[in-house]
Amino acid sequence: MITTTGAVFTAVLLLSLGYWLTGGNNIFVFCGVFLTITFFIWGMVCLTFFQKKLAEFTNRLCQTLDIMMDGGDRERIDWEAETFLARISHRLERLYNILQTNRCKAEKEKNELQSLLSDISHQIKVPIANLKMVNETLSTRQVSAEKQREFLQISKSQLDKLDFLIQAMIKTSRLETGMLIFEKKSASLADTLSTALNGVLASMEKKQIDWSVDCPENIAFLHDSRWTAEALYNLLDNAVKYTSVGGSIQVEVQDWEMYLKIDVIDTGKGIPEKEQAEIFKRFYREETVHDIEGIGIGLYLTREIVTKQGGYIKVQSAVGKGSVFSVFLPKK
């Protein structure tokens, strides 16, 4: 309104000035009035057109923003078009993709945290319940010294299970959050294997399991010896758990051009084919092995440790014929 009033006032002022300078020439005044009216008409047309385009642009921009906020399908934009809307839409698209990536990442982390908390809750429920039962029995009933020793042994085993679970969860958390930095140094594979084997020798002797290691002593390559030993220990520990008394476990190392292949071969119960894709999941255990001690995190940790060092792991198994877990670690 102010702009229109100002324009009319300026036009009248210019026409009056022109009329005075031309000595009262009516033709000049007529032409001036005609041009002024024409200018105002075209000005109104252009303004109306501009307002319409601005309204369309604003509506499309708002729709695009609403769709982005709702996570729906966006309208296809012609990125080749050199229009103001195309340029802004292109930048909004980039912003949307960044926000979507961050949203998916946050959602994934949230789901993983919920899954982790659920797994922890499930795993600690049984040992805590057992400890409560033992504690209540010892505090409310008169029991013999022999029974006390038996209950204390049960408590110790449950505390050991909780301690093992907590340590495993700490390792898992450090791996998943990226807090763990692998220190890859040139080290002997034979020494790393020896460290892993030392953790299961007592169990193998107890079950009278024959074992053998075929590993050249001169193999040295870049790897984190401590965490690699942890990964190999988990494989050996699983092999011992699921191999019957009098069975056998073999460790064979093959020096390939790009990788070192480490096979852990056992004569255990074997793994059904349909389960082989699941066994590396965190806390996963087959329905048929719940009577065997374990929490289902060893293979998950092994895969994470091997993968984060640039390697990979494979399994070959058949029910009743044992299993072969093959670890491939890069030589450089």
Image (cartoon, rainbow, N blue to C red):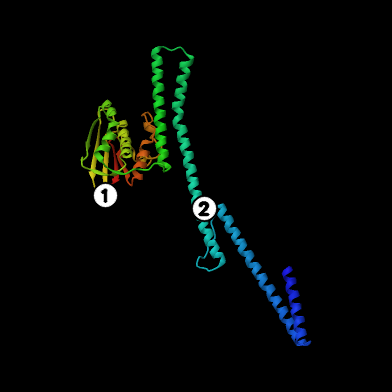
Badge 2, how many Cα within 10 Å: few under 14, some, many 20+?
Answer: some
Residue 40, picture quadrant: bottom right
The image shows residue 40, relative to residue 128, as above or below, that is below
User: Image check: 206 left or right of 28?
Assistant: left
Nearer the observer, 323 or 231: 231
Nearer the observer, 160 or 273: 160
**Which numbered tag is attached to residue 167?**
none
Q: Residue at x 41, y 22 (%)?
A: 155
User: Image check: 202 left or right of 121?
Assistant: left
User: Image check: 23 left or right of 98?
Assistant: right
In the rendered structure, which amino acid carries the disc numbered 2? Leu
Q: Secondary structure at mark 1?
A: loop
Are discs 2 and 1 less than 8 Å apart at CB?
no
Q: Secondary structure at mark 2?
A: helix
**Distance of mark 2 from mark 1, alpha carbons?**
39 Å
Name the residue at the right extreme: 24
- Image coordinates of residue 216 in percent, x first then y, are 20, 41
Residue where numbered disc 1 is placed: 258
- Image coordinates of residue 169 in percent, x first then y, are 42, 35
In the rendered structure, which amino acid carries the disc numbered 1? Met
Q: Earlier in the sequence, mark 2 or mark 1?
A: 2
Q: Quadrant of the N terminus?
A: bottom right
Badge 1, how many Cα within 10 Å: few under 14, some, many 20+?
Answer: few
Nearer the observer, 17 or 215: 17
- Image coordinates of residue 190 in percent, x first then y, are 24, 38
Residue where numbered disc 2 is placed: 99
User: Image check: 331 left or right of 79?
Assistant: left
- Image coordinates of residue 244 in percent, x first then y, are 28, 29
